[in-house]
Structure formats: structure tokens, C-alpha cells
Image: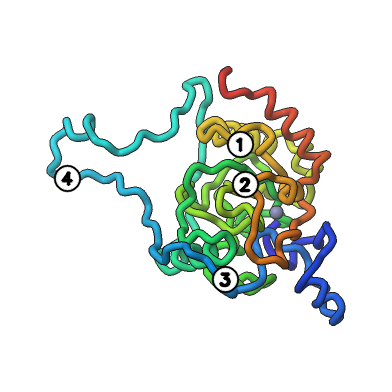
Amino acid sequence: MIRAARCRGIVLPVRGLLATAMLAGVLSVPAGCGGQAGTAPVAGSTTSRAVSPPTPVALPASAPAAAAVTSTTPAPPSVPAAVPRPAIRQWPIPFGSARKLQMAAYSLRHYGEDTYVLSHPRVIVEHYTETSTAQQAFNTFAPDVPDNEFHELPNTCAHFLVEPSGRIDQLVPLSLRCRHTTGLNWTAIGIENVGFSDREILENHAQMTASLRLTRWLRCRYSVSLKNVIGHNESLSSPFHHDAVPAFQHQTHADWNHADMGRYRALLARLPCSAG
Ligand SMILES: [Zn+2]
């Protein structure tokens, strides 16, 4: 889930600023799929202010063909031939230089890393949109405005949508960080399954087939272990979870609970990386 209006509420006990807010009688704050409050820089951070650019891969147009063969550009992670890439429609949300710089600033505030680059993702997070259509989710992510839950920039997003029909849309390149899961945005790929509940998606054969094929391809491509394919609701128990803003170190959402992700992972386990 992504935005306050579509999220159910904080699942675990709240502390710190949220507790203060509760005492003040203002905590009708629902859980935010990607949102985190607090905009103060991380005290004592020694992280360089330099923003890490994406890895350049383009060769000069005049480069001889042999140069491509001898290029020192690191090879992408190997993909076992038996794992097919599912059909993916490219449907990018605007993610220009301003949004990238906002993402780097967000990463510095929350993770002590001044970069917008997603490198070596270690976690895949499953969500559902609480919308009936992909267009509604796209419309939520596309404008780069402060999210309506925590009022931070950049706006929330996800790398992929999986539609009820089984169509897969890619909204954000895998080289970029996206705000979808508090504490894990530094290393997690976000997949939004269009729908209103875990069960609705689990019972949709076309959508589940697509979701599993996409997740399998991603986890095999990046060597993400089965246990690190998690539901948003499992985020706090991830060994990769951390956030420098204390009020949000215990913040998660209700989408894809442990029991339902157990079903999801059991299905995913039938699709190993080493087999066709
Ligand atoms: Zn979510």
C-alpha cells in the first residue's frame, strides 16, 4: 500500500514522536507504505555529500565494435538461462534529476547514504495497492509532490505493478531507489499488486502467475534468497531493515502479512532459479 488514504494503520506499537502525537490526540495517522516522517539531517553523519551517479555504460559512437567486447564495464548479474523474463510493459513515472536528488537526500536522512542508486538489491517487497486499477496507482506515484502521509519528498513509488489481468508494468528503473517500504528503501525492490487484499490477489490465478514469474525473475537475477522475498507487513523483521529516524524504526503496514506471504513463498519455492 502506498498512501495514507489507502492504508490501514500502524501495526506495531508506536514510540517516540508517534507516541507524542498520540497523546496529543492527533494520531489518526494510518500506516504509510513508503512514507517516513522527520526531515532533519542525520546527526554526526560522515557520509559524503556527493551524489553517486548511475554507472555509465555507453560507449562513444565512434568506438570500434571490438571495444564492446573488451569493455571493462562490469557484467550484469548472471541470469540462469532457465529463468525466463516475463513480458513487462514499460510505463515510467517521471523520475528526473530533481526527483533523483530528493531521493538521495531522503536516503541520507534515513539511511546515511547520499545516493539515489539502488545497487545489489537484497530484498523484494510485495504490496497491494488498495486501488482497483493500475492507472490509479500510477496516478498516485507519478507527480513528484510530498506524500500525503509524512509530507516528504520525493513522492512514494514502486518499481512494478502487477495488474489483475496479469499484465506487468515497470514504473521505475531497477537502478533507482523507490519509496515503498520504510527502513528498506535503500535495498529493496517494490512490487505493487493491484487489489485490496492479500487474499484477493492470492485467489486471482492470472495475477498470481504474473506476480510469481516477476518475483522469480528478479530474485534469481539478483540472488535474493526466498526468505528475503517479504510482504510489507514483514518489513520490521527483515535483517536489512534500518532507519536513522527513531520515530519510524517501528513503522510498517498491514499489506501482505506473514501467513499470506507463507503461501506466496511456498508457491515461489516451486519456481527455483536452477530449474525451468
Ligand atoms: Zn505496502
What number is the disc on residue 58? none
In the rendered image, which residue does mark 1 sit on? 215
In the rendered image, which residue does mark 3 sit on? 43
Q: Secondary structure at mark 2?
A: strand
Q: In the image, residue 64 lies at what x, y percent?
A: 13, 36
**Whether residue 59 is visible:** yes
Circles 4 and 2: CB atoms closer than 8 Å: no
Circles 2 and 1: CB atoms closer than 8 Å: yes
Q: Residue at x 18, y 46 (%)?
A: 60
Q: Residues within 10 Å of mark 1 (few under 14, many from 20)?
A: many
Lower sequence index among marks 4 and 1: 4
Lower sequence index among marks 4 and 2: 4
Circles 3 and 1: CB atoms closer than 8 Å: no
In the rendered image, which residue does mark 2 sit on? 191
Residue nearest the observer in this picture, 268 or 120: 120
**Whether residue 163 is visible:** no
Q: Which amino acid type corresponds to the residue marked 1 in the rendered image?
A: Thr
In the rendered image, which residue does mark 4 sit on? 61
Q: CA separation, marks 2 and 1?
A: 8 Å
Q: CA separation, marks 4 and 2?
A: 36 Å
Q: CA separation, marks 3 and 4?
A: 45 Å
Q: Which amino acid type corresponds to the residue marked 3 in the rendered image?
A: Ala
Q: Quadrant of the N terminus?
A: bottom right
Q: Which amino acid type corresponds to the residue marked 2 in the rendered image?
A: Ile
Lower sequence index among marks 3 and 4: 3
Q: In the image, residue 93 lies at what x, y percent?
A: 50, 59
Looking at the rendered image, the disc whose residue lies closer to the viewer, 3 or 4, is 3
Quarter location, residue 261:
top right
Q: Residues within 10 Å of mark 4 (few under 14, many from 20)?
A: few
Q: In the image, residue 81 lies at what x, y percent?
A: 47, 21
Q: Which amino acid type corresponds to the residue marked 4 in the rendered image?
A: Ala
